[in-house]
Every structure is written in C-alpha cells, then in structure tokens.
C-alpha cells in the first residue's frame, strides 16, 4: 500500500490492515499489536526517513506499507521509505522525552524485527509480529503483566459491567486527524 509521506495516510493504513487481517481470521490481540506496530513504523518513516524516489524528479512522496500472513500463520509487517541520515535503532529516551520509544515498543511486541536495504535508495524495516501456530520467541515476553498480545501472555483484567465490549478501534478516529 502506498502511504503519503506524512501523517495523512497513517489512519487509512491502520484501517485497511485491521480489516484485512480480521477478514483472514487473525486474532484480535495480534491485529491490535500489528496495527500499533504499523503506526510506529509509519510514524518513524515520516519523521526520520525520506519519501521513496526523493532523489529523482519522479519521487511520489510516498512510503510503502505491507503485511502478509504466511502458511503457518506468521504475520510480517513492513514499511519501506527512501532512507534517512541514520539507521533505525532503539533509543533510550529520558522519562520526560516526548518521543523515542517507538522501536522499544516494537521490540516488546515483536518476535523479531530488522532493517534491510532493498533497491538503491530504499530501506525496509520489517517486523515478525507472530511466529504462527501460537509460537513466540524471547521478545513478546517483555510486555508488562496483564497486557494482552501474543498467545501465552496474561489476559487483561475485565472490569465488571464492561465484559464483551470491544475497544480495539476506539482511538482510530482520533488518530485519523492527527495521523
């Protein structure tokens, strides 16, 4: 999916991913993790990367977002941009910093992730969200107790009177305006 380099397309990409993954039977907890990861990757691409084709006059000002579920149920999320001045690495932000936590969030949710150089002028950050068949590696276990996510993580506490409510898309509209 081509996504405009900037906040405008992030909400659209999240909605499309959520719809497609749910229609393919991916569990809600994995969909939620994948949507958050996609948001972080797209935000990083817009903040730190260049649009694809930036070095030519034919550059369209987009980045690419892709996701796929393999035969074993493994879900991979990828975002490709035109590269930037630095390589993506997790930061160590101060407690009061307004940003810098995205790759740490991804590290906590993902089984694994990495960066690859594709065609000249293209950099892809890829994330394996779920290894399929309920497996998960050393990552994914770094989540706080009580958080839902990959199979095997503890369930969230249910608030009496709110059983069965689905808030998974509750904030999508709020982010659509801001990206």
Image (cartoon, rainbow, N blue to C red):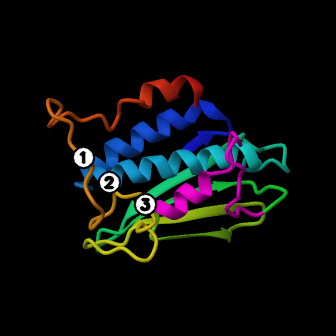
Report whether residue 78 is seen. no
Secondary structure of the residue carrying tag 2 is loop
Q: Quadrant of the C terminus?
A: top right
Decide: few, some or many residues near mark 1? Use Cα within 10 Å; few <14, some 14-19, many ≥20: few
Labels 2 & 1 near each other (Cβ < 8 A): yes
In the rendering, at what x and y percent does residue 75 appear? 39, 64
Examine the rendered structure and indicate whether residue 131 appears above or below residue 51: below
Distance of label 3 from label 1 (alpha carbons): 15 Å
Using residue 150 as the reference point, say whether residue 114 is left or right of it: right
In the rendering, at what x and y percent does residue 18 appear? 36, 43
In the rendering, at what x and y percent does residue 70 appear? 35, 69
Magenta region, residue range: 87-109
Where does label 1 land, which residue? 157
In this view, the residue in front, 152 or 40, is 152
Labels 3 & 2 near each other (Cβ < 8 A): no
In the rendering, at what x and y percent does residue 34 appear? 42, 53
Secondary structure of the residue carrying tag 3 is loop
Using residue 77 as the reference point, say whether residue 17 is left or right of it: left
Examine the rendered structure and indicate whether residue 159 appears above or below residue 51: above
In this view, the residue in front, 13 or 152, is 152
Decide: few, some or many residues near mark 2? Use Cα within 10 Å; few <14, some 14-19, many ≥20: few
Task: Name the residue: 69% across, 43% down.
Answer: 46
Labels 3 & 1 near each other (Cβ < 8 A): no
Secondary structure of the residue carrying tag 1 is loop
State whether the magenta stretch is mostly helix, strand or loop.
loop
Kindly identify which numbered label has been placed on residue 143. 3
Where does label 2 land, which residue? 146
Distance of label 2 from label 1 (alpha carbons): 7 Å
Task: Compare marks 3 and 1 and give the one earlier in the sequence.
Answer: 3
Picture quarter containing residue 74?
Answer: bottom left
Task: Name the residue: 54% across, 51% down.
Answer: 65
Examine the rendered structure and indicate whether residue 128 appears above or below residue 169: below
């Amino acid at each position: 999916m081509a996504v405009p380099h900037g906040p405008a397309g992030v909400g659209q990409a999240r909605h499309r991913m959520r719809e497609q993954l749910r229609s393919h039977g991916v569990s809600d907890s994995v969909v939620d993790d994948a949507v958050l990861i996609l948001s972080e990757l797209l935000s990083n691409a817009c903040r730190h990367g260049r649009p694809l084709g930036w070095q030519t006059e034919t550059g369209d000002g987009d980045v690419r977002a892709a996701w796929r579920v393999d035969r074993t149920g493994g879900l991979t999320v990828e975002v490709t941009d035109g590269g930037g001045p630095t390589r993506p690495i997790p930061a160590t932000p101060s407690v009061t910093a307004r940003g810098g936590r995205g790759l740490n969030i991804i590290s906590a949710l993902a089984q694994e992730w990495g960066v690859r150089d594709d065609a000249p002028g293209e950099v892809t950050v890829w994330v394996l969200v779920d290894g399929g068949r309920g497996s998960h590696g050393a990552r994914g276990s770094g989540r706080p107790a009580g958080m839902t996510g990959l199979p095997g993580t503890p369930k969230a506490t249910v608030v009496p009177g709110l059983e069965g409510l689905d808030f998974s898309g509750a904030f999508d509209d709020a982010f659509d305006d801001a990206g």
